[in-house]
Amino acid sequence: EKEPIRVLVTGAAGQIGYAIVPMIARGVMLGPDQPVILHMLDIEPAAEALNGVKMELIDAAFPLLKGVVATTDVVEACKEVNVAVMVGGFPRKEGMERKDVMTKNVSIYKKQASALEQHAAPDCKVLVVANPANTNALILKEFAPSIPEKNITCLTRLDHNRALGQISERLNVHVSDVKNVIIWGNHSSTQYPDVNHAKVTTSSGEKPVRELVADDQWLNTEFITTVQQRGAAIIKARKLSSALSAASSACDHIRNWVLGTPKGTWVSMGVYSDGSYGIERGLIYSFPVTCEKGEWSIVQGLKIDEFSRAKMDATAKELIEEKALAYSCLG
Ligand code: NAI
């Protein structure tokens, strides 16, 4: 039997936490033959609820789950973890300024960065889910300088999966027959969902999405805004933000990162920009990536038209501003 992998989930008593821990314990994240030990962190006010989640994990009798650590101590939570899914954060409350929320999250991510750097396994893979996801990941990277930058990512796979879902609904094909959409940039409403390279598997081979949809107007307007605004639409309908889809997409992100992407398929991940596609270095920006042997690499050489260029730059600009705001909150 394989050695268990230690997976940290922060904010584990929250909505996404509640959805993701059973997925991890069932092998959705790391594979059906990979034992796991779950580390769950939350804050003191949620300690009792966190313990309740631990009780349920015991009650569910998962064959792959070899241990559960439930704690409010960030050092204990980070001990020897191989994968860290950072879901905990400070939500924006009514009447709060962007800067106030940023200040709270910067201080949380600074502290958790140090704990991960000192106590996690040296090759720990980090996925930041909590918003502002890209900028929280950037802060984490800044304050964990010994963790390689390639090991720090943020979640835009939910947006990617939402884009696949919209195309599949429009064309009335199964979502697994659609591939290679791209989410560029920030996990926010400025993100750019791009279908220019996306393909659909049909009975007569692979066809470009643009050819099959044949309605450029829809692709260039409604499709983009639907994906950008999907999070808000879920909140409106559920009175709560996306949780099961966020949890499932976070599992997809880690699974592809660790176990690889299928040949000819890429996925979107928020990763440290190396300047690819003219995106300023030093931002955590969502790019199309392929993964092999536990490492992602940005898909190179895609043709970018003027329409895309403007949208890719607009979302980069927002990230540059967020970065400046985050640094100003460091005080
Ligand atoms: P939630 O409010 O239900 O849960 C958050 C949990 O984090 C709470 O249990 C809270 O006590 C905990 N927490 C707060 N500060 C913490 C700290 N310093 N250390 C550890 N835990 C802490 O929120 P939900 O719905 O689970 O969402 C979590 C985050 O994920 C939010 O920031 C949300 O905006 C973000 N999100 C990101 C998505 C993405 O695609 N990147 C999609 C959906 C949500």
Image (cartoon, rainbow, N blue to C red):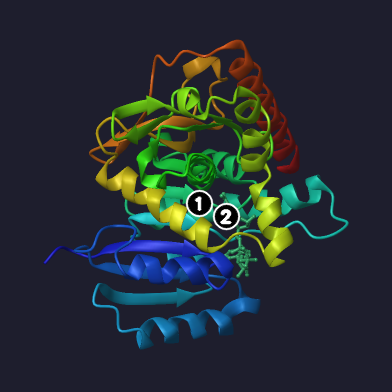
- Asked whether the viewer can see residue 309, the reply is yes
Farthest left residue in view: 1
Farthest right residue in view: 95
Badge 1 marks a residue whose secondary structure is helix
> Which residue is identified by label 2?
111
Q: Is mark 1 within 8 Å of ligand 1?
A: no
Position in image of residue 8 (x %, y %): 42, 62
Q: At 66% across and 57% down in the image, what residue appears?
A: 234
Residue nearest the observer in this picture, 288 or 319: 288
> Which residue is identified by label 1?
114
Position in image of residue 147 (x %, y %): 40, 42
Q: Which label was assigned to residue 17? A: none
Residue nearest the observer in this picture, 292 or 200: 200
Quarter of the image that includes the C terminus:
top right
Quarter of the image that includes the N terminus:
bottom left
Residue 159 placement: quadrant: top right
Position in image of residue 76 (x %, y %): 43, 69
Question: What is the distance, in whole Å, between disc 1 and disc 2 at their CAs?
Answer: 5 Å
* Image height of 79 relative to 99, above or below: below
**For the residues bearing labels 1 and 2, Cβ distance under 8 angstroms:** yes
Badge 2 marks a residue whose secondary structure is helix
Q: Is mark 2 within 8 Å of ligand 1?
A: yes
Q: At 46% across and 28% down in the image, what residue appears?
A: 212
Q: At 36% across and 41% down in the image, what residue appears?
A: 177
Count residues near mark 2 (Cα–Cα under 10 Å), then give few for <14, some for 14-19, many for 20+. some
- Asked whether the viewer can see residue 76, the reply is no
The kind of residue on which mark 1 rests is Ser
Q: At 88% across and 56% down in the image, what residue appears?
A: 95
